[in-house]
Amino acid sequence: MSSQSAFQKFRTSRSVQRKFSIGIRLVIAAIFMLFAIFPILWIISASLSPTGTLATQTLIPKNPGFGNYLTLLRMDQFPFWTWFLNSIKIASITSALSLSITTLAGYAFSRFRFRGRQTLLKALLLINVFPGLLALVATFLMISQVGDVLPFIGLDNHFSLILVYLGGAMGINIWLMKGFLDTIPRDIDESAMVDGASDWQIFTRLILPLLRPILVVIGILNYIGTYGEFVLARVLLRSNEQYTLMVGLQIFAGAQFQQRWGVFAAGALMGAVPIMIIYLTLQDQIVGGLTQGAVKG
Amino acid sequence: MTSIAAQNAQRKASSSKPILPRLLRLTLLIVMDTAVAWFLIKLVSLGYFPLVAAFSIITIFVNIVVLWKEAYPIRWMVVGLVLMALFTIYPIFFTVWVSFTNYGESHLITKQQAIDQILNQKYLPPTGKSYSWTAFKSPAGDYALWLVDPDGNGYLAKPGEAVTQPEPGENGIGELDEKGIPKTIEGYQRLNAILAATDQNLTQIRFGEAGKTIQVRSPTEAAELLQLFVYDATQDAMINQETGGVYKNLRGTFTSSSGEELRPGFIASIKINNFRDFFISPALRGPLVQLVTWNFGFAFFSLLLNFFLGLAIAIMFNDPDFPFKKIIRSFLIIPYTVPALITILIWRGMLNPELGVISRSLENLFGWSPPWFTDQWWAKIAILLVNLWLSYPYFMLICSGALQSIPQEIYEAARMDGANPWQLFRGITLPLLLVAVGPLLIASFTFNFNNFNLIYLFNAGGPPIPGTPTPAGYTDILISYVYNLAFSGSRGVNYGFAAAITIIIFFIVGGITLFQYRYTRMWEEVSENV
């Protein structure tokens, strides 16, 4: 009997302990959450604050309003809306084309057996050890040289920027795609082939629909990576109307940071929100992709 | 495997069947080859030989892939391969080439182009064939010169046109006066001697066509300009015709024995000098040691801080029954969802001395706030802090994924044996976790090693190190230093040296990555999976 009560006591103490521990952890969680969202809250407040300079801002703005947003969209010198559309355009085209390249190559690596296949797959890994950022100088010189002959693939051009981004499409993600394709049984292909379907028909009608989950992850990560890319765009684009949002925001910050902090905050927020929404709605898929080694960009 | 062989056989058979698509393919190929040929000719004429080589090889490759039946699988990825070759592989080779040259400020053109430009320079000989001159000016501001040689022959010279010897009445030339000078030239106004002597423009203008130009030397004399330099191919040197000085080719600049240099210089191989400068140049040693130390320190401490904060959070909430788990996670990953550039700029604003919210709050609370941007140590701390905010969610996510895959029975068994929580963590959690996330940690180290965005956007590498030969700051890492060398024109671009440092970074990063493959046996796994 006594042993029974001792056990009971032990159990209650454990459960009290547990409640206590959860309580403490909730407090810590609250502190971390504050750390996580404080900059965001502050930028929201800045964007709504009518005074609009860095010095005068308080966390809860007096007389909040959308004046900064209106100013943002009306500035001639800093065409925010054009930048935003440029970014959307470049990121959409790049991620769609990059996804096509990755998928087609992944399919070929998974379904065909050809000489040099293993070498090529390993070479892809090795080549990507060289960070693209390092080739910045060479890429810049190359694009400016090509542009001397063909201006539409030269500096200050979205087309050439997209091409440079696509140069990285044959990357680590091909491994991910190939791995996923390997899990799709080959019997599906074979039965279709017996019916006389061509490779292309098998790929588009049978395989592609099965790839949807992985296409979403790779496509979204690529989109986010391209949208947030800064260095290449900064180096290759030259004129105000051609800038992407990231380049534009950096230049705006460099020029008018302190005087027009509220306007900058509005721009930063409008630039960040679409990506935040994508992340938070698709967080489970994206987390899954990240842990498997998918890469942004 | 036999079924695959059969499939392949079937594929080969079926791929040679249709004729129309093949014709279409051939037509497209011919069109493409023609366009590339035109493009290559243009590139050759501009002297861009590395690009010519790259495009030629790639075009040959594409032709082989399209025409050769065995290459059928490669056709599925030919576009990707071409883009990779152009924008990933070619830049690597180009970087290697540039790193052995002096490519940069005043060394931007080929040797032939530089020689042509230098040969174009002229000088006005102090003696030699000379003329007396009379200037004429049109209402539009164009000048013409009437020249009389010692024999009394008259010539008409205009800028950019050949010198002619017209008779009065020809070409609008009026009657000659007693000195043999036309009284009028149609469309021009004759300038009197005082006007002509005080006209600042006249002495600058080169009359006559290129190669045989005449310039005003003094108020009474005009003379034919001579070519200043002659190129001597055997000595690889320029000879100054005026002084007789010899300018020898020294690392891509024609330089006299007294050190005088001719502009422009040209791109030339300087062998390993860029690398030697990196390792042993006394002027660069101080800043470079500082840069490299901070580069490693930054990557290491970033990894340590970010990983342990992420891990701590993951362990704290690694409890299936924890309340509001999903909401807490959504909040905690918010920093990761904001594009990094925006985050960095926001932090730059928040830490702004005197104006930013953090600095102001600290000021109000303690009467002092750290000089985040002007003191090198506080700048470094600020960068680590911002990077912590940026990347702890990533580590939190991968750690909580890895934690969930550790079977609970191991903990039960260890607890039975009387292990305390710290022993559980040291003995079970950490080792198992490191096996799972180790490769991602190494990848993260190499990412931070080249985390250009953070350094450049937060503080542009500042505060600057005083007295460096090329701009460098206390928080600069190698890649941002390279960017300054190549793109910030303040003290002249130096692509060659930038490329050499790039190669050095590549060896560091490549070494770490190969170690990762080794350490994680990823290479073997890769080989098995293929």
Image (spheres, coloured by chain):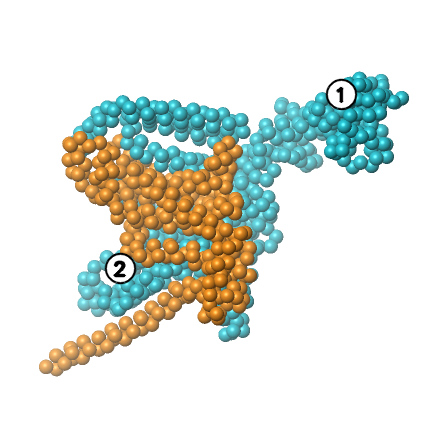
Chain colours: A orange, B cyan
Q: Is residue B106 above or below residue B458?
A: above
User: Mark 2 packing: few (<14 Cα in 10 Å), some, or many (20+)?
Assistant: many
Location of the C terminus of chain B (image quadrant): top left
From where the camera sits, is residue B204 visible?
no
Q: Position of residue A233 (x, y in %)?
A: 47, 46
| Vertical side of A110 occupied by A17: above or below | below
In this view, which residue lies farthest toward the bottom? Answer: A2
Residue B382 in the figure: left or right of residue A297: right
Q: Is residue B442 visible?
A: yes
Q: CA distance from mark 1 to mark 2?
A: 96 Å
For disc 2, the marked residue is B403
Residue occupying image coordinates x 45% and y 25%: B37
- SS at mark 1? helix
Chain holding disc 1: B
Kindly indicate the quadrant of the structure image that contains residue A180. Answer: top left
Provide the secondary structure element on which disc 2 rests: helix
Q: Quick one: which residue is furthest to the right in this view?
A: B178
Label 1, on which residue? B171
Of labels 1 and 2, earlier in sequence is 1
Out of B421 and A221, give the one closest to the viewer: A221
Q: Look at the image and tell me in which quarter the N terminus of chain B lies.
A: top left
**Residue at the image position 77 percent from the left and 18 percent from the top:** B170
Residue nearest the observer in this picture, B183 or B129:
B183
Q: Position of residue B100 (x, y in %)?
A: 52, 36
What type is the residue that disc 2 sits on? Leu
Query: Height in image: B389 above or below A76?
Result: below
Q: Amino acid at mark 1?
A: Asn
What percent of the width, then of the height, locates residue A31? Answer: 37, 69
* Image depth: mark 1 or mark 2 in front: 1
